[in-house]
Image: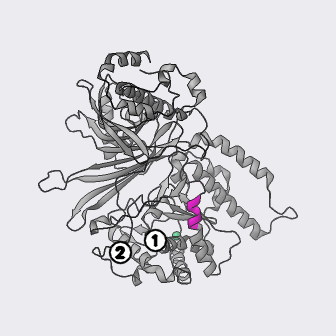
Amino acid sequence: MRTSKWMVLIVAVTAVLTMTAAAQQTSSASQNPQAAANQPAATQAAPTTMDQVVDRVIEREKGLVKMLAPRTPLVETYLQNLQQDPQLGPIPQNDRYFLGRMDLSESIDRSDFLKAEKDKDESMERRLMGGFTKAFKFQYTPLGFSWMIFADRDDFDRQHYEFRYARREFMGDVRCLVFDITPKKDAGHGRFLGRIWVEDQDFNIVRLNGTYSHARRNTYYFHMDSWRLNLIPGYWVPAYIYSEEGDFTAGAKNKIAFKAQTRIWGYNLKTTMGNDELTQIRVDSVKDDTPAAQDASPLAAEREWQQQAEDNVVERLERAGLLAPEGDVDKVLQTVVNNIEITNNIDLPRPVRTRVLTTSPLETFSVGNTIVISRGFIDVLPDEASLAMVLSHELAHIVLGHNLGSQYAFNDRMLFSDESTFANLGFKHIPEEEVAADKKAMDMLKGSPYAQKLDSAGLFVKILQVRAGQISSLLQAHLGNSIADNGTVTRMAQVATSAPALDWNKLDQIAALPLGGRVKLNAWDDKVEIVKAQPVAITSARDKMPFEVTPFFPRLTRFSTGVAAPPTGQTTTANAVPANTN
Ligand SMILES: [Zn+2]
């Protein structure tokens, strides 16, 4: 702190005029009185020079590093290698999927990448290249695309960087100050080079865009665009990172190109657990609706057993951050399921529930009476009829009594680490049940309100068939049956037979959407919601981008109080900057 004051004195001469406006913007409402009482006056005063702003940015960044240190969020990277198509431009050639957990305690990915403390630059490189060259095997390990959640975790300061104010800019609803950041001459390898956007109330970084500089020979730093969201009071937490490399212009030598989306969520998984458990106990002790008069009949016992397994699995997946808490998206899904049930006179002993898997790969499965569908699958479906097609297959399994997972009614089977979820849970049906479910689903669809709208569902299956060979990682299920096998679509293939022909030139024919267009996952509490994006007119075949990866452009808004209570634990408010700097 003393250092920063001293800095201000020296550089105040160069203060930029634009700062007065920023100072006015600094809202006193954002300052929690309790936090203010704990803070030295110097950190509370609104900055009046651009250099004071930079000091505040550095402080806030250190505060974020500290706040996130005990957390182990999930991090998912989905990458598409690209090839040039004469008509469609860059399209997927093959893909990679990676899901892991970040350990933010002392440095990012510490367990895997930073063992060689003696050469920090080298470890940074291995962090990048390691993640890339390890071929993104599907397992929980740290990965290379997550490093840009911070500009520089350890040395983000004036000793290592030049900060140059560029301009003021609105990002969504949030007014930001924009700075260009360059590493100082002898700052070393692997330093951030690029631009940051800083919100103008508490001076948190909300976006980072750039790369790392001073790569050594034979090494390469990716370009990244990293976004943070104000999901809790006072902090903007890293949520999305977009990466892209390659050049398809005429004459370009490097034709290797890729696009990758990294999503981070589950920040609050461990801290909420205690509270949830208490709530659970209270609820359970109040309502016990099992008839006490007599023992369960054999069939009733069987159903009870199934439900127990179902509840165990749902609870376990939610605890691992792989299942979103019940919410509004489920209501949409449930409506579609109900539409099929009612029109087919399906009367099940228990209502069918739906839940959203938080991951991108296209998969569904069911356990007991719960149908689970992945976030990525909902994203790419073009309309309600195609959603009905996907859900009808799982509903068919339930109707046909293809119950799986009764072994999970034994609670010892729930005792495994989150990281080994996919090794410990599985809901794959035998091929005969898959065929039977498809057949039953077709029958149900024909008797449903979606019967006349199955063209779009058929087109979806067709475009899936066109791309299946190139997006095998996206089509690889991790808990249920995959919808394609060796580049051939196996799920609901029959729907395609009556569908119209695929035509890239028909701009109103949207067979499948890009990833990320429908479902928004809250990085802090894992809740999902339907995105309210304005539809954008498609002007060429290249705009269709089925199943493709695109950049992120979240509309930034400030955390609104009154919507949700502040999270538990050490997170407080904006100005609770930890005292230790440097
Ligand atoms: Zn199935």
Queried whether the magenta region covers residue 331, the answer comes back as yes
Q: Is residue 4 visible to us here?
A: yes
Question: Which one is in front, 31 or 259?
Answer: 31
Q: Is residue 419 left or right of residue 566?
A: left
Q: CA distance from mark 2 to mark 1?
A: 12 Å
Q: Residue at x 35, y 72 (%)?
A: 463
Q: Which residue is mark 1?
A: 383
Q: Which residue is mark 2?
A: 509
Question: Which one is in front, 18 or 188?
Answer: 18
Q: Is residue 27 left or right of residue 351?
A: left
Task: Answer with the quarter of the image where residue 540 lies.
Answer: bottom left
Queried whether the magenta region covers residue 377, the answer comes back as no
Q: Residue at x 61, y 81 (%)?
A: 343
Quadrant containing the C terminus in the rendered view? top left
Q: Report crowding for label 1: few under 14, some 14 to 19, many 20 or more residues within 10 A (C-alpha).
A: some
Q: Which region is colored magenta?
A: 323-333
Q: Report crowding for label 2: few under 14, some 14 to 19, many 20 or more residues within 10 A (C-alpha).
A: some
Residue 368 placed where, x, y %? Answer: 64, 65
Above-or-below relation of 8 to 440 = above
